[in-house]
Amino acid sequence: MTAPAPVPPRVLTVAGSDSGGGAGVQADLKTMLALGVHGMSVLTAVTAQNSLGVQGAWELPVDAVRAQYRSVVDDIGVQAVKTGMLSSAVLVDTVAELLAETGVPVVVDPVGVSKHGDALLAAEALDSVRTKLLPVATVATPNLDEVTQLTGVTVIDEEGMRRAAAEILGHGPRWVVIKGGHLPGDAVDLLTDGREEHWLRAPRHDNRHTHGTGCTLASAIACGLARGQDVPAAVRGAKEYVTGAIRAGFALGGGIGPVDHGWLARAAR
């Protein structure tokens, strides 16, 4: 008799759809497959999106978001959750409430704008992110623009990243990754819980096709946490994965192409 196949760790993404396939739920599920976990999704919004930008966005009703979440969590179960695009205060509040009841590691990517500069978070939702969503986060992963949105801090150097981390931690997440990819020089991120610091550095690749980088990093962290890694190990592994994905990013359409979520499989051939 054939033994049943082992069940892989299960990771849930709560995020918006990117019709171009480079970011959002599509990037999350590709990352989860590449890193050996079973990916599941709760769709929060639908976007019309391609390499040139976001042409339209439609938020799903709160009842639809809640029903998707309960359907997955109550039957299949999860080992980690990653959140992405939550475009309104009511969605942020609803998802934060669901996460607080679930009791698993949560990676919050506080998506504010797209790679092309399109707004993906209503201004009135910022307070809900600060007071409801960040307090339930195991790890928060803001980029420098999102740091400014949430805290008013403008980061221009590594010391500014420390100040930004302290501001974000003041809202309640256990750990924060301040992503310094917009600074000159090597791509440096700061992971800290307010006591220990981990500076994660990688060479900067001359490749403008980086759509989906933030979604991919946050999802990869969630995969590591679902496999039982501690936060520093999960973030280090995610940094290595996304660095390879950026290096292999490719052109699509007439604008900014995506990172390559399948680079690990191709490298192994």
Image (cartoon, rainbow, N blue to C red):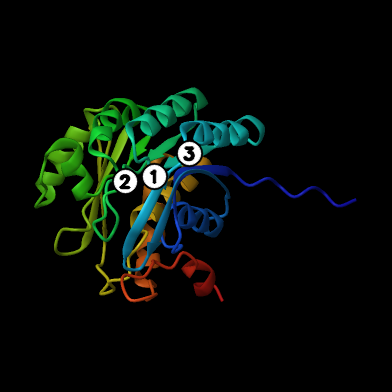
Q: Position of residue 109 (x, y in %)?
A: 34, 44
**Residue that mark 2 sits on:** 111
Residue 66 is tagged as none
Residue found at the very far right of the displayed protein = 1
Q: Secondary structure at mark 3?
A: strand
| Lower sequence index among marks 2 and 1 | 1
Label 1 crowd bin: few (<14), some (14–19), many (20+), radius 10 Å? many
Q: Are marks 2 and 1 in contact (CB under 8 Å)?
A: yes
Marks 3 and 2, how far apart at CA: 15 Å
**Residue that mark 3 sits on:** 81
Mark 3 vs mark 2: give the one in front: 2
Q: What's the residue at 24%, 49% (across, down)? A: 143
Q: Secondary structure at mark 2?
A: loop
Residue 84 is tagged as 1
Label 3 crowd bin: few (<14), some (14–19), many (20+), radius 10 Å? many
Residue type, label 2: Val
Q: Secondary structure at mark 1?
A: loop
153 sits left or right of 5 in the view: left
Q: Is residue 121 visible to the viewer in this orientation of the structure?
A: yes
Marks 1 and 3, how far apart at CA: 10 Å
Q: Position of residue 9 (x, y in %)?
A: 59, 44
Q: What's the residue at 29%, 73% (across, down)? A: 207
Q: Are marks 1 and 3 in contact (CB under 8 Å)?
A: no
Q: Quadrant of residue 105?
A: top left
